[in-house]
């Protein structure tokens, strides 16, 4: 085993389903991988031949392939630390006895 292996990015393709909706009820895009596949913090996903934005009022569901780039050990650590720091900004709540008008 190479001592650099935890720091090397691994890339592979995986089949997926892409759903894009542009309606008055919802504006979203989702990618679901086939099988039992999990994305970890820091991983990158690029859908090959991704569909463009559908016209208003439509929903698109297509089968595509995605290139997944696994994050190295340092990227995973940094992503977790940065995520925790961003989350703590939501905790910034103060209570005071004065009421502002």
Image (cartoon, rainbow, N blue to C red):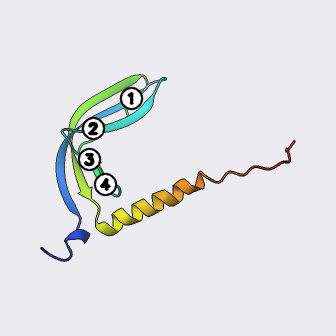
Which numbered dot is residue 44?
A: 4
Give the percent coordinates (x, y) of residue 91. Answer: 61, 52
How crowded pointer 1 is (Cα within 10 Å; few <14, some 14-19, many 20+) is rated as: many
Displayed quadrant of residue 63? top left
What secondary structure is found at the residue carrying circle 4?
Answer: strand
The residue under label 1 is 21
- Judge left or right: residue 51 versus residue 21: left
In the image, which is nearer the foreground, mark 4 or mark 3?
A: 3
Q: Residue furthest left?
A: 1
The residue under label 3 is 38
The residue under label 2 is 32
Residue 52 visible in image: no
Q: Are marks 1 and 4 in contact (CB under 8 Å)?
A: no
Displayed quadrant of residue 51? top left
First along the sequence among labels 4 and 3: 3
Give the percent coordinates (x, y) of residue 68. Answer: 24, 52
In the image, which is nearer the foreground, mark 3 or mark 1?
A: 3
How crowded pointer 2 is (Cα within 10 Å; few <14, some 14-19, many 20+) is rated as: few
Residue at (44, 24) in percent of width and height: 23
For the residue pair 63 and 69, the one nearer the viewer reads as 69
């Amino acid at each position: 085993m190479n001592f650099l292996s935890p720091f090397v990015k691994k890339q592979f393709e995986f089949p997926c389903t892409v759903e894009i909706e542009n309606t008055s009820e919802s504006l979203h895009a989702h990618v679901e991988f086939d099988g039992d596949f999990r994305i970890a913090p820091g991983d990158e996903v690029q859908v090959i031949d991704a569909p463009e934005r559908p016209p208003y009022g439509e929903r698109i569901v297509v089968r595509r392939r995605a290139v997944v780039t696994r994050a190295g050990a340092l990227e995973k650590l940094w992503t977790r630390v940065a995520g925790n720091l961003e989350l703590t900004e939501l905790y910034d709540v103060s209570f005071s006895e004065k009421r502002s008008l």
